[in-house]
Image: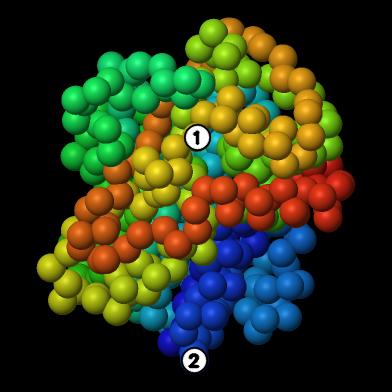
Amino acid sequence: MRVLITGICGFAGAAIARTLLEHRDGLQIVGIDNLSRRGAQNNLEPLRALGCEVLIEDLRDPTALELQPKADWLIDAAADPSVLAGLSGSSPATELLRTNLFSTVPMLEFCRKHGAAFTLLSTSRVYSIKALLEIPLTLHETALQPAAGSPFEEGVAESFSCQPPLSLYGASKFCAETLALEYGSAFDFPVWVNRCGVLAGAGQFGKADQGIFSFWIHRWAAKRPLKYIGFGGLGHQVRDCLHPADLVPVLLQQFDAGLAADKPNVVNLSGGIDSATSLRQLSDWCASRLGQHSVATDGEDRPFDLPWMVLDSRLAQSEWSWCPKRPVTAIFEEIATHAETHPGWLDLCGA
């Protein structure tokens, strides 16, 4: 089976490639990456050493896939993952759309031509910011959580509103989802959209607006400045956490099921409520594991920030018998060990 992974040198793409090889024999993995993300170069030779063919191409060029031979499966892990993308001159909206939306078209044309299955790694940011901000929250110790009796006690399900505003980033991913599902329906090839929570693990190129768990632990280990931003500057805001390797069991099931599957094409995949962690809770963990460190406060809210965002993955659990294997503390420990053994990582990935 030939598998094409776009964005293979990114954190998620590389983790998925490695884990696929561990889970299934006989795979030929071909990856495409433009190495534009700082740190991505670090994954290039290790992937090649595992037998992956990695091509340095830019998917924003619509001809990048035209000469690629037939593949059975295309996994799209290529994206600008920042919710703040498109808001500044250094990250213009047109460039965000070229990366996250327009480059999806040649991938879908490739799948149409070859009858390949298509998997899109999407995001929790396709859900409505306005509706998310209306969820009643209460403070429990140092973390926000839905009020007792709330329908969101297990997280935000797939039926939640996707009404704008979503952020330019969220809109680009939601449009890509819609386009992929329409292509699959029109041209009769399998399409799977997996909306992921916050991905985290060793080797992630974490920054303050993306990969927050990795960013925080690495900065803490290096004793570099950290700051609670927004919502009173207290660090009570909460996110879920998932290791990308835990995606692979459900990705393989989806591929094997193909068009014959009577399964939902769109599912949430996240660490869920069991992984939900506030920045204050993460700081407490870091202090216990890595020693004391001070955190500054800044109560000014950032655009598109949310006080609480946890995905409900019970649909994936019921339909695919899927659940994460790595608890959140194991993910944090993996990152902390990486931070200790790679003290220059923050500079390498521009964080």
Give yes or no for contact between labels 2 and 1 (Cβ–Cβ under 8 Å). no
Across and down, in percent, residue 301 comes to 53, 12
Indicate whether 274 appears above or below 185.
Answer: above
Q: Please tell me whether residue 122 is drawn above or below residue 1 in the rendered image.
A: above
Mark 1 lies on a secondary structure that is strand
From this view, report whether residue 180 is shown above or below residue 189.
above
Is 269 positioned to the left or the right of 262 in the image? right
Residue 163 screen position, x and y as percent: 25, 28
Q: Which mark is residue 140?
A: none
Image disc number at residue 26:
2
Q: Which residue is mark 1?
A: 277
Left or right position of 241 against 155: right
Residue 342 placed where, x, y %? 83, 53
> Which residue is located at x 57 percent, y 14 percent?
234
Q: Residue at x 83, y 42 (%)?
A: 347
Instruction: State the separation of the CA atoms marked 2 and 1.
Output: 38 Å
Q: Nearer the viewer, residue 246 or 163?
A: 246
Q: Residue furthest right?
A: 344
Earlier sequence position, callout 2 versus callout 1? 2
196 horizontally vs 93: left or right: left
Task: Name the foreground residue: 33 vs 127.
Answer: 127
Q: On screen, 278 above or below 117? A: above
Task: Tell me where residue 155 appears, x and y as whole percent.
Answer: 30, 37
The kind of residue on which mark 1 rests is Thr
Residue sticking out furthest to the left: 262
Name the quadrant containing residue 274: top left
Q: Nearer the viewer, mark 2 or mark 1?
A: 1
Please state which amino acid type lies under the numbered disc 2.
Gly
Residue at the image point whose x is 64% and y is 36% from the top = 285
Q: Secondary structure at mark 2?
A: loop
Q: Is residue 38 visible?
A: no
**Quarter of the figure with the N terminus:** bottom left
